[in-house]
Image: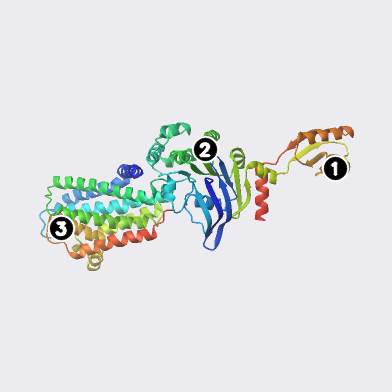
Amino acid sequence: MAVIEVSDLRVSYGSKEAVSGLSFETDYGQIFIVLGPNGAGKSTTIETLEGFRSPSQGKVTILGLDPKKQQRELGKLIGVMLQGGGVNPRMTPSQALTLFAGYYDNPIDPAELERTLELEHVRKTPFRRLSGGEKQRLLLALAVIGRPKVVFLDEPTSGVDPAGRIAIRELIARLRAEGVAIILTTHELGEAEKLADKLLIISQGKKVAYGDLGEIKAQHSASQITFRSADEIDPKSFEEHLNVALKRPFGNELYVVEADGSPELIANLARYLADQGIGFSDLSTSSTSLEDIYLSITSKADA
Amino acid sequence: MKAYLAQAKSEIRLSLTQGESLLVTILIPVIFLLGFSAIKVLPVPKGIHSRVDFLVPGTMALAVMATGMVSQGIATAVDRTYGVLKRLGVTPLGKSGFLYAKITAILVVEVIQVAVLYIVGTLLGWHPQGNFAIFIVGALLATVAFSGIGLLLAGTLKSEAMIGISNAIYLILLFLGGMIFPTSSLPGLLATVAKVLPAQATSDIFFHALGAGGSIPSSDWTTLIVWAVVAPLLAAKFFRWES
């Protein structure tokens, strides 16, 4: 059984369906990232997994438990980082960590978390006076202090400076290595690309891409080989020899071949051009980034 | 149990270390007791031996009202507005654990309030007599009633609105509650309104239980019991854990 199993999840607010038939699963030691534009249904999906919302249809289990009906039992097993909130504004990091450590049977030492997440210098500062990044680091610390089996992180690096981001990413990597299932939402696609084992992209409440990063890239990417040449190249002859189409999108010296830049193809291409006596430069390959894929598939879904 | 104890300790610490909470729960009742004992500007009921015989039970009623309705009400509204209540729902504490911890904090603060007012009253020459068991029953009912009102407001209002509205209700109930001057001094209509409010019932029960003697009017018990039942029921119906 997977740690999280979601089958045909639908969640409605009145007559409006915010989530429409999502199915996915994730397992221990995986970073599962949920992406989507604002209003796509990400928060509703995550809050349903956390037990804050009831599905109008479908089934959700976390560690075999129903998150809505067994939220308190689940509270012992999961850690949750809500966006920007969840701590009394007068409480200091030290007080909040001690309080949360008191909820669990075998918590992480608060002092260790203060060190790991660089909160020692603000341990006596009230939450309301912390910077955005310090608040985020404290909320993350509170999410993991109970040694959860599953942790939900809502935009954990939002508003965090580069050094803080590194500390947060290192902690997330450590959790993954310890076998914790991590469900993370973010708007930062570069970060998603770095961290994700598995991705779910939602648009208008529907799943538009799902799988591991490699699978999604294979399904949606359009890798390219580009080079420059001042000579005229016959596209027909090129295609006959190399079995790939040649384009000259701007009518200038830039030629584009839409294909994976395998070493074999690149070697054949270079040999063909040399055999034809065609001079060329700037031969390079590029693969589509997650950001390109995300923008492409969400804009298609929104259209 | 571990989670409940951790939360109760935190709630008690927050209650006893926040300036405005201490002001409304302890300082104002003590200042009223000291001030109106010394400055004899307000009327007191006829036939009492000393002003403190009226002011000690009255300020104790004021203290109980302030803790359940104002101090803890505002604290709960702040917690709700800042997502604390939502976050606690996904900890081993749970929502019920949070409520038990809150009730514990209210009771601990009330014990401290009563002890402080008892000592100050004694220093002012108050000679407590009467039936403490009845006082405790009245105090528990009042706690339930005022905490119910506090939770009803906290569960439906934003923290900023809660501060203003709970303080306004506090002032109205202070004025109509027979806590620092008897409701018999109020004009006819206001005196009638005061009779159905929990503040007047609480101060009257405390006044009779702690020394004035005589039987407590059954209307006081009825009023307080109705508030102690209706306010928590309304709070349970309308309370929203998320802002």
| Inter-mark Cα distance, 2 to 1 | 49 Å
The residue that disc 2 covers is A179
Instruction: Identify the secondary structure beneath mark 3.
Output: helix
**Crowd tier of the residue under label 3, counting other residues whose Cα lies within 10 Å: few below 14, some 14–19, many 20 or above:** many
Tell me if I can see residue A279 in this picture. Answer: no
Q: Which mark is residue A239?
A: 1
Q: Nearer the viewer, mark 2 or mark 1?
A: 2
Quadrant showing the N terminus of chain B: top left
From the viewer's perspective, is B126 left or right of A27? Answer: left
- Closer to the chain start, of discs 2 and 1, is 2
As displayed, is residue A143 above or below residue B150? above
Label 2 marks which chain's residue? A
Label 1 to label 3: alpha-carbon separation = 103 Å
Q: Which residue is mark 3?
A: B208
Name the residue nearer the viewer: B105 or A46.
A46
Circle 2 — which element?
A: loop
Residue B47 falls in image quadrant:
bottom left
Residue A252: x percent and y percent?
83, 41
Mark 3 on the same chain as mark 2: no
Taking the image as shown, residue A245 lies to the left or right of residue B50, namely right
Q: Amino acid at mark 3?
A: His
Confirm or deny contact between disc 1 and disc 3 (CB under 8 A). no
Q: Residues within 10 Å of mark 2 (few under 14, many from 20)?
A: some
